[in-house]
Image (tube, helix red, strand yellow):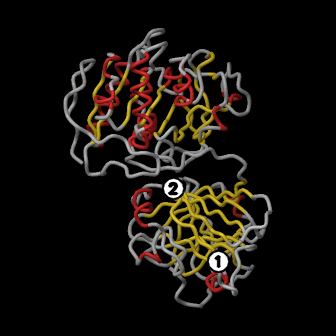
């Protein structure tokens, strides 16, 4: 919402709290282990960007554990963990090693299929065809650990898994560097995650086609062969469906580890469509705020209120009414990405295209606000260009995660055109026609709306786009 008062107050930096002021369903029933899938019905997975199954409707997940090569002794622990997660979070879990479960009719009962440390050639030609149809119809895939050591001669599966296994060193502790802290599989993690597992090297790097969630720091362990960019977890929208892969899960202990269980749960929830995230490949972005105090050097507070820097690397609004803006540089054509989270019915926004000023009303009067508030009138709710153009409400509602969960905005500015994506889904396409405003050059900022509104931001990054003759 626009700032309703033009007053400006000096704000302070509270050292202890690092306040940034004037500074630069019901539980699922278990199904029998290793048996045929339990009869019942579940909505087929939704296509990327299309309607997900109703969140109040119990979902169903198939865990597939057939092996034609090495057999991991952690598979029973993995099945038990997924079953427990299902019981806790409202989805039914069936487990099987029987490839005959891969028929068109049977797969349509599941919102996602988990390949849990499968190895070798596990599906025949007819079963492969059925699974391809399932993915193309909007189904979800979750690959765990040796799922990358599976079906080497099936091109469709190569794209689904993202990369094939090449080798591994001995089990040892390593540092996982978390790149995406908005995705439900990694939002609970700190930027560095220390854990013990068997760490795979892959035959190729999936980064160009998949959205990398986490990488391995090869300096933290011995035996890595991929160099400075060693992805270990990723996701992608694939051929109409959703694909998530994690390289963890070799050891039995992994499935008793709370952080890994949450990681696995987040991947399953995204694959079923129960949670949303932007899984398009992301390359070439420069961080403007990365969660560290030093990354705030280019930012300044306009107007009253402040932002609090949390231990989790987030900036949370405190009081108001004001705006934290990036004063170090103006931008022309660009893609701006940032993650945000509400605690309830809260209010904030992202301002773009305004001139340098310590008066927050300069952004209101000369720029545009991309709103964060799901309960106002359509032209003033999340995804709208505030007071100018509503988002596509149906698409917005399908793409939006609820309070308490992270969301990702992409705000793409080219010429006078402004496009907004929420968790990867385009929800607004606006062209400025106001001669008093221009999107062709300006600053960016985030709003602290006032007492009672608590919105957190994380990982603000930008990619400058080639200059063209845009409208």
Q: Residue 97, percent across and down?
A: 34, 16
Mark before the other along the chain sequence, 1 or 2? 2
Point out which mark residue 425 bears.
Answer: 2
Q: CA distance from mark 1 to mark 2?
A: 21 Å
> Looking at this view, is 110 or 406 the one in front?
110
Q: For numbered disc 2, what is the local secondary structure?
A: strand
- Please name the residue shown 68% across and 22% down the image: 224
Q: Which mark is residue 432?
A: 1
Relative to 16, does residue 96 appear above or below in the rendering?
Answer: above
Which residue does the image show at 26% across and 37% down from the upper left?
87
* Marker disc for residue 372: none
Q: Residues within 10 Å of mark 2 (few under 14, many from 20)?
A: many
Residue at left offset 71%, top offset 29%? 219
- Image quarter of the C terminus: bottom right
- Farthest top residue in view: 69
Q: Are marks 1 and 2 in contact (CB under 8 Å)?
A: no
Residue at left offset 67%, top offset 30%: 205
Q: Quadrant of residue 267?
A: top left
Mark 1, secondary structure of its residue: loop
| Along the viewing direction, whichever of 272 and 88 lies nearer the viewer | 272
Q: Is residue 470 above or below residue 357?
A: above
Q: Position of residue 21 (x, y in %)?
A: 63, 74
96 on left or right of 168? left
Q: Position of residue 133 (x, y in %)?
A: 41, 32
> Horizontally, is 65 left or right of 214 in the view?
left
Looking at the image, how many numbered discs can be counted on the residues?
A: 2
């Amino acid at each position: 919402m626009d700032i309703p008062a033009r007053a400006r107050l000096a704000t302070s930096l509270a050292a202890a709290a690092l306040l940034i002021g004037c500074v630069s369903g019901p539980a699922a029933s278990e199904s029998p282990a290793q048996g045929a899938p339990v009869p019942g019905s579940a909505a087929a997975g939704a296509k990327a960007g299309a309607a997900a199954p109703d969140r109040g409707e119990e979902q169903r997940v198939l865990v597939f554990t057939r092996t034609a090569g090495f057999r991991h002794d952690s598979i029973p622990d993995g099945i038990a963990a997924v079953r427990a997660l299902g019981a806790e979070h409202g989805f039914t879990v069936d487990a099987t090693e029987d490839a005959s479960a891969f028929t068109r009719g049977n797969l349509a009962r599941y919102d996602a299929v988990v390949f849990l440390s499968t190895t070798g050639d596990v599906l025949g030609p007819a079963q492969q065809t059925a699974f391809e149809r399932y993915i193309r119809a909007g189904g979800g895939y979750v690959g765990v650990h040796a799922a990358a050591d599976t079906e080497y001669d099936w091109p469709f599966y190569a794209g689904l898994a993202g990369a094939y296994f090449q080798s591994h060193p001995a089990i040892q502790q390593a540092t996982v560097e978390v790149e995406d802290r908005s995705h439900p599989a990694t939002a609970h993690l700190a930027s560095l995650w220390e854990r013990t597992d068997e760490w795979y090297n892959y035959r190729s790097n999936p980064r160009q086609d998949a959205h990398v969630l986490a990488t391995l720091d090869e300096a933290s362990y011995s035996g890595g062969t991929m160099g400075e960019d060693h992805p270990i977890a990723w996701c992608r929208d694939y051929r109409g469906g959703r694909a998530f892969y994690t390289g963890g899960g070799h050891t039995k202990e992994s499935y008793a580890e709370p952080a890994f269980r949450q990681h696995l749960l987040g991947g399953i929830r995204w694959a079923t469509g129960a949670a949303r995230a932007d899984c398009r490949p992301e390359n070439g972005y420069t961080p403007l705020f990365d969660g560290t105090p030093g990354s705030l050097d280019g930012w300044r507070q306009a107007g009253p209120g402040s932002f609090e820097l949390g231990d989790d690397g987030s900036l949370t609004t405190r009081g108001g009414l004001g705006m934290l803006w990036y004063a170090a540089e103006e931008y022309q054509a660009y893609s701006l990405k940032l993650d945000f989270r509400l605690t309830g019915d809260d209010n904030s926004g992202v301002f773009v295209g305004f001139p340098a000023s310590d008066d927050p009303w300069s952004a209101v009067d000369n720029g545009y606000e991309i709103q964060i508030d799901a309960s106002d009138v359509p032209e003033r709710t999340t995804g709208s260009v505030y007071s100018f153009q509503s988002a596509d409400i149906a698409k917005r509602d399908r793409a939006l995660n609820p309070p308490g969960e992270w969301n990702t905005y992409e705000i793409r500015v080219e010429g006078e055109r402004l496009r907004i994506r929420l968790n990867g889904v385009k929800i607004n396409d606006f062209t400025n026609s106001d001669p008093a405003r221009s999107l062709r050059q300006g600053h960016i900022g985030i709003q602290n709306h006032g007492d009672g509104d608590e919105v957190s931001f994380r990982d603000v990054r930008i990619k400058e786009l080639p200059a063209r003759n845009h409208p």
